[in-house]
Amino acid sequence: MPQPPILTLLSSLLASSARGWRGTQVLRVAAPPKQPLLIHDRENDPDCRLLRELLTELQLDALVRPCPLGGRRWLRKLPQGARLPCLVDRDHEVTADGLRACLKHVLATYAGIHLGTGLLASLPMRLSSRLASAVRGDVGLRAQPSRAARKPLELYSFESSPYSRLVRERLCELELAWVLRSFGKEQLADWGPPTRRLTWKPWSPKPGGRRARMLAQTGKAQVPYLIDPNHGVELFESVQILQHLDRCYAR
Ligand SMILES: N[C@@H](CCC(=O)N[C@@H](CS)C(=O)NCC(=O)O)C(=O)O
């Protein structure tokens, strides 16, 4: 199976390392809202990353509207004057914009933590997220000419996943709305690539978890996993996913 270029993969690994691999492990499974969260997001934006890490850690899904620099498709739907990240929680009739407001709402509503944002928006967090963005440079930051998709795509991903990041960056550049299916690690044995997990015993998914469900449905538990309802396609490999996105949506 073709792999992404080694330097691309290395810098994606470095970006996750700069963030101490936050956004990998599910820390608490939040009760999901009835209507999915909606976020206006820019993949390589340091503040947006900190919100997405929390979504992984609470195993929360969201409809993502990418707003790259120079993009118009979703930026113009952003409430007037709102900053990124911007989160709309229709169940609670809340629109939060800017990192602190978004973190505060998600922590209070989905983790039962009412102490503000704690360390999550502190200077070390923001600086290390800036470093992670710097490592990826311009990728996932600026809009590129694209064709709109009729229905949102669906991506299984966890924030620190070096392979999933490459797909999220492309979705952002192409301004394609997508549903995030949060796929953070559910147990220690899930760490590592699908072929070399952190366990001596034969790997088995956490019963009742998302990996167990994916394994039963597809025969694999791996991300990135993209479902494109517009083309009736389901893909696992990052390189194939990128080729599909370019073929179908890049101009
Ligand atoms: N060849 C695959 C590699 C994908 C991969 O190694 N994914 C890791 C996460 S970055 C994974 O699924 N690990 C197992 C797990 O999370 O359960 C690709 O290019 O997409």
Image (tube, grey):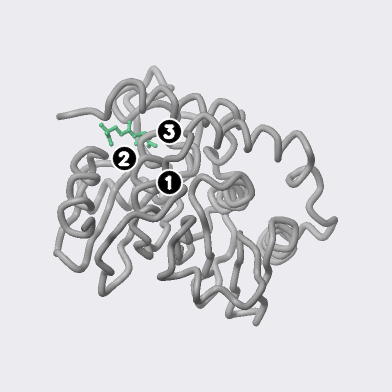
Q: Which residue is mark 3?
A: 190
Closer to us: mark 1 or mark 2? 1
Residue 110, quarter of the rendered image = bottom right
- Between residues 98 and 88, which one lies in front from this camera angle? 98
Q: Residues within 10 Å of mark 2 (few under 14, many from 20)?
A: some
Q: Is mark 2 within 8 Å of ligand 1?
A: yes
Task: Tell me the quarter of the image containing the C terminus.
Answer: bottom left
Give the CA distance from mark 2 to mark 3: 10 Å
Q: Horizontal and vertical percent for residue 238?
A: 26, 39
Element carrying mark 2 = loop
Q: Horizontal and vertical percent for residue 108?
A: 74, 63
Could you say which disc has been placed on residue 140 in the image? 1
Closer to us: mark 2 or mark 3? 2
Q: Residue at x 50, y 74 (%)?
A: 76
Tag 3 and tag 1, C-beta contact below 8 Å: no
Element carrying mark 1 = loop
Q: Residue at x 61, y 65 (%)?
A: 86
- Give the residue furthest to the right: 115
Q: Amino acid at mark 1?
A: Gly
